[in-house]
Amino acid sequence: METLLSLFPSTLSPDVNVRRASELELRRMEAQPGMLAASVQIVASSEVDTSIRQAAAIYVKNRIARAWDTSIPRGANESPHVSEEDKTVVRAALLPTIASVPPTLRVHVASALYSVVRCDFPTQWPSLLDDIVKLLTSQEETQMYAGVRALVEVVRAFRFTDTDTKLEEIVSRTFPPLLQTTQALIDSEHVALPAVGEIVYYALKAYKTSMIMVLTKHQQSHESIVPWGTLLLRVVQLPVQAEGNDDETKAKTPWWKAKKWAFYSLNKLFSRYGIPTQLPPSLKSYKPFAETFLNNFAPEILKAYLHTTDAIVSQNQWVSPAVARHILMFFTESIKPKSMWIQLRPHMVQIIESFVYPRLCFSDADEELWELDPVDFVRMSNDPLEELGTPTSAAGVLLNTAIARRTKSMFEPTLAFITKVLNAYPNQCTPRQFDGALRMCITISQTMVQNEAVRDSLDSFFVQHVLPSLKSERPFLRLRACAMVQTFDQAGMKWQSSQSLEAAFRGVMDCIMDTELPVRVQAAEAMGELVAHDEVHNAIAPNAGRLMQELLKLSDETDLDVLMMTQEKIVNNFAEELLPFSVQLTQQMANSYMRLVQDNLAGGDPNADGVHAFNMEQGEEDKYFAALGCLSTMYQMVTTAESRPEILAELENVLLPIVAYTIETETIDLYDDCFQLTDVLTYYQKRISPAMWNIFTLMYKSFKSSGIDYLSEMIGTFDNCASYGTAMLQENAEYRHMLLDIFHTAMSSDQLVVGDRISACQIAEVVLLLLKGYVDEAVPGIVTTLLPHVQKNAESPSFLLRKWATMVILEAIYYNPTLALQVLESQGATAGFFSEALPMLTKFRRVHECKVAIVSLLSLLSLDPASIPEAMKSGYPHLFQALLTQLKVLPKLVSQRQELHKALDEGFEPEDDDGSLNEQQQQDLQQVYDLQDTEENGTTPKAA
């Protein structure tokens, strides 16, 4: 015990060496019986310093999570599993410890309980539920709290199981006493106390956690749903004082946390289990419950929510953002069932005008964030996940759902309200109110554009209300006007006059040079839509390079990926105009990419394998997506220079250093996009430079270590290096060895899958076809490795892999028929291989495959009869027949390929009436892809 008391404080030392030494000593002691039990005793002891107890609690939590479950094997260098003696002591101590320790320690002890319950309930801990019920029914506050806190962890342990009976047992045995305790607390004279609110909060958290995946039979019963539903409605309507200076502080008080889970639970019961017509197939068994809930309970919930909404609007009653969001979400779900819509419809116009609209207006919080951190404002505004949990997002979803699903009854009054607000500006309407009306337009833009009564007047609407706002003195109105231009143009709005389109273009162009960063970003996104118009395209073309530089500058200022799509649109629309600037622009992007990667990696440590995973903590993940955006736009720049070899060579000089850095730092999250760059560079240039051979070597080394999972991304570059660097491979045995080693590693590694083995076959193919006479020593290894994959069996169930294995062995026969037959004979596989291969030839559908079959068969038939194995002689007629068949098929395949290439060159009509490729077009395109063949060298197509 004394040793532990001295070690635990050291685990929190700021000195990393002291900390590691104490952690290693703790690991060494873990083999001693009673060590974990003693640690739990320290956590529970009120006589021990709190900081020591904190360190001990963290250790106990981690030790149990790591080593409690005996079904997970421990490595030779890892400490042993927790002993059965320690487990018995720990199980007995966990619940009393949760009851006695302060909140800062309780969270760690509860987490430890969760890990134990997942492994031990019910077989090793049959008394657990009885122990929890005793705590729940106690008259002591600390005991009740321990009961609800423990129950949350027990329910959490099985919350994602939809077939396990454990949750049914847990709920049926513990929820009745949990309900009685919670009801009694709400009825007590001490209901307003924070301690009571905390217990109710955890009680409702247990309830909401229990129904994430299933609603147990107990909970569906009338005896359960009625009192629980009543309790939840009582909590929803319970008057609670909001204490604190700001929304965040108020929302964290116990009773507002309890209210949040009450609203959540009612919403979940309704949206997941309570609407019969919206039950997915997996939940059809809930239909009887759903019908009862929709008819009897949902209307009561709606009444309570409407009452709360009226108090918010008319009495300015405060509710937490989470509660406001849940109310809005329930209204959204209530729009869909006819019976609920009938009850909601009389209130819906008032809800939109008084409850939804204010939440769409530019707020004090928006202004504060804009001023303090404009980059974060841009990130929050452009990240759907950031807005997903906000009342603003829920208000937008409610408005859009109401207009889209109940257009006849809601569109006209909503549009009338919007028009009223816009017309009142600036004399009787504030800029923020005007902004809210514009945001409502953005939310329902699709309906406005498609509505016959409105769409033809949108041009004049923009001239009157939107275009002047591009020059507003209020930055947030300039931003919103740019967003209007972007959204409506994207939705398909028709500009009725060239003057209004030009005014929009000029206004947005001015906003790209705005003093405010959020305005510049939004303007750039709007410009990405406007460039599709010929008038705008022609106006921008002379200054496309300057515009692109502004976009890159913006990206550097924000370190966000929000402009990636805009940049790609500019590159695609102005390929010729940007060519003179392509090297300079790519260098800017390469510099940005290096800075983003270096900054991010500086904030994180490599894992145990030395791999640098991108730091994806909040805020830092933006650098990852921004780096991907740089790679994507640089790829677009390369594609625009396809026919300019001198520019491609310069671009390669810019790009290869960043690819090399990415591989050398093992930043594997970016491998996919980096290898697309090397793939397209090698394919377009049709040559392999010394610098690219260096990349080839780095990719090989990466494949042999941390990058082994990225073979399918590397294969294009490997293939191109072989196809366009054949002379170097003929001279350099080391490069040949690398390719062959990749093949054997990919075919044998348990870490890889069928797709990787097919990539390995592609490598073997180019080696055999392009290096004839240079890899004789490799033929036996290739053939023997692929033979097990020719036959359909457990080792090779994939038809495509069997086809590839067959084809590569045929290519080995073409490479050197005598040598290949010797290998087959040595394996006793000659007859077996041909019995599988000849039927497989009928499955060869590509021109290249047919050619391989022909040259391989010709190679066999041209051998001296004396050198033919006995196993083959009786099958000669079959070989002749197969050759004749392939010769007959080849002209048809060539003709078909030419026709399809011609069709592709002339261009399919890409859209059917529904905007998608029809079935025949899809089949034709797939055939084009299947039949594509690189005539040079007869290799498989190169990714471009």
Image (cartoon, rainbow, N blue to C red):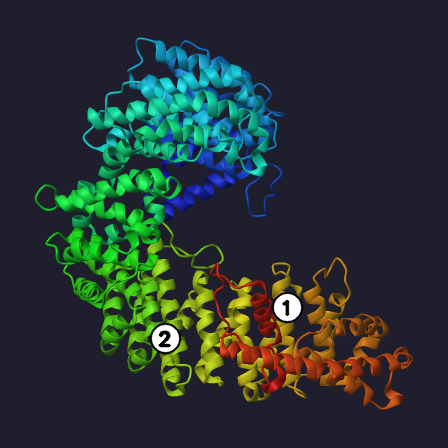
- How far across and how far down the image is residue 665, in percent? 42, 65
Q: Is residue 430 left or right of residue 15?
A: left
798 is higher (above) or lower (below) than 835:
above
- How far across and how far down the image is residue 25, in percent? 46, 41
**Label 2 neighbour load within 10 Å: few <14, some 14-19, many 20+:** many
- Which image quarter: residue 344? top left
Q: Secondary structure at mark 1?
A: helix
Earlier sequence position, callout 2 versus callout 1: 2
Q: Are circles 2 and 1 on residues that touch, CB within 8 Å?
A: no
Q: Secondary structure at mark 2?
A: helix
Residue lying at the far left in this picture: please name it: 427
Answer yes or no: is residue 323 visible: yes
- How far across and how far down the image is residue 246, in percent? 20, 32
Residue annotated with mark 2: 637
The residue at the point 25 percent across, 47 percent down is 439
Q: Quadrant of the N terminus?
A: top left
Q: Is residue 419 left or right of residue 268?
A: left
529 is higher (above) or lower (below) than 137:
below
> Mark 2 belongs to which amino acid?
Met
Q: Is residue 865 left or right of residue 399?
A: right
**Label 1 neighbour load within 10 Å: few <14, some 14-19, many 20+:** many
- Which image quarter: residue 106? top left
